[in-house]
Image (cartoon, grey):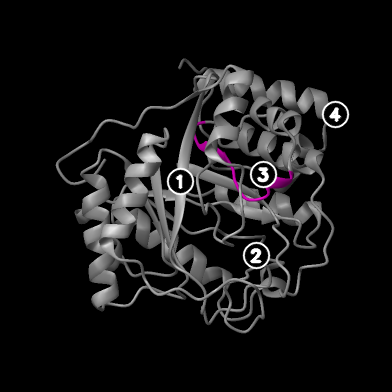
Amino acid sequence: MENNSALRHDWTKDEIMEIYDQSLLELVYRASTVHRQWHNPQEVQVSTLLSIKTGGCPEDCSYCGQAARYHTDIKVQALLSTETVIAHAQKAKDSGSSRFCMAAAWREVRDNKDFDRIIEMVKAVNAMDMEVCCTLGMLTEEQALRLQEAGLYAYNHNLDTSEEYYDEIISTRKFDNRIATIENVRKAGLTVCSGGIIGLGETPLDRISMLLTLANMPKHPESVPINALARVKGTPLENLPKVDIWDMVRMIATARIIMPASMVRLSAGRIEMTEVEQAWCFMAGANSIFTGERETLLVTPNPGVSEDRAMLSTLGLKPMAPKEKKNSCAL
């Protein structure tokens, strides 16, 4: 798509706040205009995220039902077999997904047999001509390079929230650990998927700060997931209020304006949105959704494939085709 504006990496908080705070209809119009300059507004990337290792995580992320220290209904599940993962990936592809994401509830990647199995999973899904994404926690540059050589296309590692508010949500790692992992992913030549969650009790300024960190990276994340808190019973944040739809629209629109080339992903929380509310998010610049069986890191439900197909048809949107392979290893 044609565009007439250059990417910026020198945003200020005041500039982003001015965008975020403007009249809602004007904000959506501006974001929609930018979206059309950089993307095909009739296409939405359909992604499927499978939890390949569930629960038992040693971290204390306050929003996450997979933390071992919280008593939730999520059952601990060991790493799935490669054959099971391939079957899920084929089902996702047959349903229209062009990206398959594999999530493991780990604090960090360890050089062991489980990681070796994930390398095999990446190779197998890559051979299916799908974009392969992983989210496995912290990892070193060498581990990221192994994933890249196996054919991984993207690595997800969300900031979650602002640097200033981070310690209120997570104590078992630091914000700088998040940044270091993203830098390792970049050094290995992988694309970056990084966004955050709203509804954690943060202020609008925290949201702006998180977007500022993403937009002022040397290279914008190719994928920016915007998640609404999925309130999981048994976690410290289970009683927080549902995220207001207009807050989601403002976040998506602002992300679209300041990171125009990125895919902006309407991620967790979609199950609580009506079709009309999701349409607003697409108008504001979202151009990717998760669909399928178990789509979010919190292992919470999202709308099913048939529902999403009907919605996309109603809105005149079509699933995006997979990107062409760049080389023999990676998509």
Residue 286: quadrant of the picture: top right
Label 1 environment density (alpha carbons within 10 Å; few <14, some 14–19, many ≥20) = many
Is disc 4 placed on a helix, strand or loop? loop
Q: Residue drawn at (69%, 71%), measured in percent from left and top?
A: 169
Q: Amino acid at mark 3?
A: Arg
List x then y, in percent, for residue 321.
Answer: 37, 27
Q: Earlier in the sequence, mark 2 or mark 4?
A: 4
Instruction: Determine the image quadrant of residue 307.
Output: top right
| Residue hosting label 2 | 163
In the rendered view, would you say 84 is above or below 239? above
Mark 2 and mark 3 in contact (Cβ < 8 Å)? no
Q: What span is in magenta?
A: 261-272
Identify residue type, mark 2: Glu
Q: Is residue 42 visible?
A: yes
Per the image, the residue denoted by label 4 is 23
Closer to the camera: disc 4 or disc 1?
A: 1
Q: Earlier in the sequence, mark 4 or mark 3?
A: 4
Q: What's the distance in space between the residues labelled 4 and 3, CA to CA?
A: 24 Å
What is the number of the mark on residue 48?
1
Whichever of labels 1 and 2 marks the residue nearer the N terminus, that label is 1
Amino acid on which disc 1 is placed: Thr
Upstream in the sequence, badge 1 or badge 3?
1
Which residue lies under the disc numbered 3? 270
Q: Which mark is residue 316?
A: none
Q: Which secondary structure lies at badge 3?
A: helix
- The foreground one among 35 and 240 is 240
